[in-house]
């Protein structure tokens, strides 16, 4: 965070990359020196499929969610995939119920 705004994100991939590049000296570096910046950010009204597409294309597994420049949460690819699976299962159940009524 920088003044309430998301400055970057520090993930396990950043840790691995940093250790590979700097070895044990990585432990002496500041997060701001090794984090991914600027961070990809989504708004709370972003569509699930849009966020999933962004994560897939940019090869990230977590996205900060910001509103009016302020961090309001994080969403993981697992959260979005679970939501999508639940949605598909609910649609399939509704279709089965419709077919049984016909």
Image (cartoon, rainbow, N blue to C red):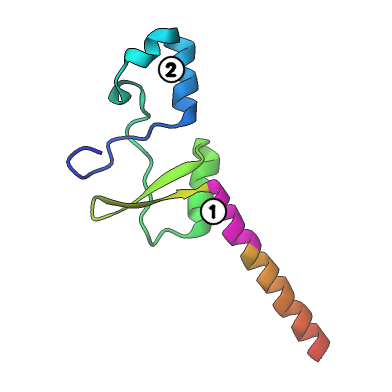
- Of the 4 image quadrants, the one containing the C terminus is bottom right
User: If you read the primary sequence from the N terminus, does the residue marked by circle 2 or circle 1 appear first?
Assistant: 2
The residue that disc 2 covers is 18
| 57 left or right of 18 in image | right
Along the viewing direction, whichever of 96 and 2 lies nearer the viewer: 2
Is residue 79 shown in magenta? yes
Residue 32, percent from left and from top = 29, 25
SS for callout 1: helix
Region of the chain picked out in magenta, as a range: 77-85
Q: CA distance from mark 2 to mark 1?
A: 27 Å
Residue at horizontal 43 percent and vertical 17 percent from the top: 18
Residue 57, percent from left and from top = 53, 39
Picture quadrant where residue 28 is located: top left
Residue 3, percent from left and from top = 17, 41
Taking 11 as reference, is 89 above or below it? Answer: below
- On residue 41, the disc is none
SS for callout 2: helix
State how many labels appear.
Answer: 2
Secondary structure mainly formed by the magenta segment: helix
Residue at horizontal 78 percent and vertical 79 percent from the top: 96
| 74 left or right of 6 in image | right
Residue 39, percent from left and from top = 35, 37
The residue that disc 1 covers is 79
Residue at horizontal 46 percent and vertical 14 percent from the top: 19
Few, some or many residues within 10 Å of mark 2 (<14, 14–19, 20+): some
């Amino acid at each position: 965070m920088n003044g309430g705004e998301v400055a970057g994100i520090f993930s396990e991939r950043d840790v691995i990359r940093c250790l590979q590049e700097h070895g044990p000296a990585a432990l002496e570096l500041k997060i701001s020196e090794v984090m991914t910046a600027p961070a990809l950010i989504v708004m709370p009204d972003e569509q699930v499929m849009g966020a999933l597409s962004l994560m897939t294309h940019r090869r990230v597994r977590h996205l900060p969610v910001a509103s009016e420049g302020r961090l309001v949460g994080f969403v993981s690819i697992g959260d979005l995939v679970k939501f999508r699976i639940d949605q598909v299962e609910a649609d399939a159940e509704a279709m089965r119920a419709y077919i049984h009524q016909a």
